[in-house]
Amino acid sequence: MFGRAAAMSRNFLLALAALTLAASQAGAAEPLRMCLDDSAPPFSFNADGKTGGFDLALAQAIAGKLDRSLSVQWFSTEDQPEAGKETKTSVAALLADGRCALAGAYPLLADALGGELADAGHLPRYKGGTREDRRRSIPLNPLKATAPFIYTAPTVVLGPTASAATIHTLADLDGVRIGVEQSSVADIILMLYEHNRLLPQLHHVPPGSGLLERLDAGEYDAVLVDLHRFDGYRVTHPTNALRPSGYLHPAGFNLGFVGLTRQADLIYAVDAMIGQWLRDGTIERTAANAGLTYLPPRDPPVRPSLSLQDLARE
């Protein structure tokens, strides 16, 4: 273990030296440019003159280690933060257009990093961008992820009308009114479960129609959503009546930073920082300070693309 830690330390110093040399050859060190979602608490947020979140705190720490200032490119996406196709393509377009060197809270799934991304994409709304910018077609470049720093998965959240205290399997939802967004990953999971066992109990709502707000209001008893989306709701609704059930579906994945493959030296240096911060508890403490439920990364670091078999499995 000590030898591995020493090797990681040497690798970090080598990568840091390479970055420092490149910066000195180019003059004063440029700011570390980071793309962060402006409405994805507790990962990142920028609203009403306030900024914060787990990703922002890590980005500031990374910039400090590199002896560089931090420049954040804030952006917005249309879909919910559950590894949606639009989010992946938007982030890839921001990186390819040179808006940032790294982007935060990226799903480490094979289809989000490999050749299944489109050849070109469009920029999302971003601070300083124009309508003409959003119309531009951006040729996408290969992506490279850092080491993962946290794990996330679909979880059952219970509302104030639910009688159950914990959920061990989805079968425990028999007889429970279940809210779910149409055509979401959660919808597929619930529809597939034991050959439509739960179908009569599903209450479908359009995406973006306040799924957790409706649960809080008692329109149904439980929902299946990404764990950290629930965290975000608790951050923005501190007086909520929702309860975690303790259930996690196996269709989870790691999150990390992502950049272009040509930024390998930077990603290599960040990998070493993440490794050190995982070992000394910095990542876990940063998550707790942001209101984020911390689950340590799991092997493999990059999960194969989720299949229907994965979503049907429990």
Image: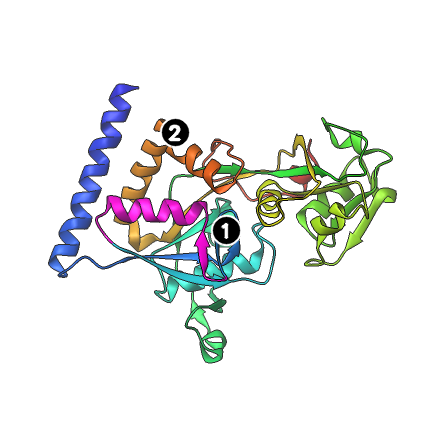
Residues 18 and 294: in front is: 294
> Secondary structure beneath disc 1?
helix
Task: Pick the quarter of the image with the C terminus.
Answer: top right
Residue 8 spot, x, y in % from top left: 26, 31
- Which amino acid, mark 2? Gly
Q: Residue at x 37, y 33 (%)?
A: 282
The answer to if 5 sits in the magenta stretch is: no
Of all residues, the one furthest to the bottom in this rendering is 132
Residue 140 spot, x, y in % from top left: 42, 63
Task: Pick the quarter of the image with the N terminus.
Answer: top left
Q: Which residue is mark 2?
A: 281
- Assess whether mark 2 and mark 1 are in contact (beta carbons under 8 angstroms): no
- Which amino acid, mark 1? Ala
Note whether residue 10 is visible: yes
Q: Which residue is mark 1?
A: 112
Label whose residue precedes the other's in the sequence (1 or 2)? 1
> Secondary structure beneath disc 2?
loop
